[in-house]
Amino acid sequence: MSVSPIDNFTIPNPAEDSYPSGNLPAGLGPTTTSTSSTTSTSSTPTVSPYVQQYQNLLQYDAQELFSVSFGTQQNAQTNIEGVLAQWVGLQQQEQEAQQQAIQAASNAAGANTNATSNLPTIEDLISQSDAAANTALSNYASAPPGSSILDYQA
């Protein structure tokens, strides 16, 4: 960020001492310690005590939430098993209701054979269509020249 004067006033750059610039106050960021030996040199970061306390707090918070929600591990397991058992029971009830509805519809269709007895079969529909087409073609064949087949369709 550059500093630019506005009406003869200069605004200082706030990023010089802020976190994104990488200049953390002492003790807040990871520090590196060097260990040297005759063969290699390695650098291992150490965690600030504040970061470590925050991580411990997060872990404790999760444990406390679990404890308040379920009490013990056994209570949590019992609760999970109970929820799953309820879900299985609801699924079975839904399947039974669907099967009963299908059976009722099947029984109603079987009892009402008069309604389905007057429906034409596919063979009846095809023969009616063929007869109508033959009639239209034979009428058009005997039509005067220049006639349209649309005039002779059924």
Image (spheres, rainbow, N blue to C red):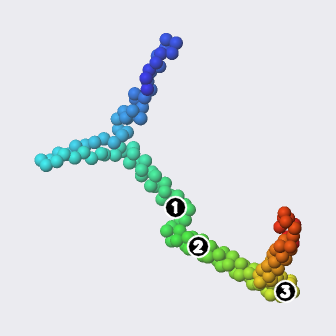
Residue 75 visible in the shown view: no
Q: Give how far across and how far down residue 34 sits, in percent.
A: 22, 43
Position of 96 with respect to 119 (left or right) is left
Q: Is residue 30 above or below residue 94?
A: above
**What's the amino acid at mark 2?**
Leu
Mark sitting earlier along the chain (3/2)? 2
**Which residue in the structure is indicated by mark 1?**
66
State the residue at coordinates (83%, 67%): 149
Q: Give how far across and how far down residue 69 sits, in percent.
A: 56, 62
Labelled disc at residue 84: 2
State the residue at coordinates (83%, 73%): 141
Q: Mark 1 falls on what kind of element?
A: helix
**What's the amino acid at mark 3?**
Ser
State the residue at coordinates (81%, 77%): 134
**What's the amino acid at mark 1?**
Phe
Q: Disc 1 and disc 2: Cα gap in Å?
A: 19 Å
**Which residue in the structure is indicated by mark 3?**
117
Residue 95 visible in the shown view: yes
**Foreground of the two, 37 or 48:** 37
Mark in the foreground, 1 or 3: 3
Q: Mark 3 falls on what kind of element?
A: helix
Question: In which quarter of the view is residue 137 placed?
Answer: bottom right
Mark sitting earlier along the chain (1/3)? 1
Q: Quadrant of the N terminus?
A: top left
**Foreground of the two, 28 or 37:** 37
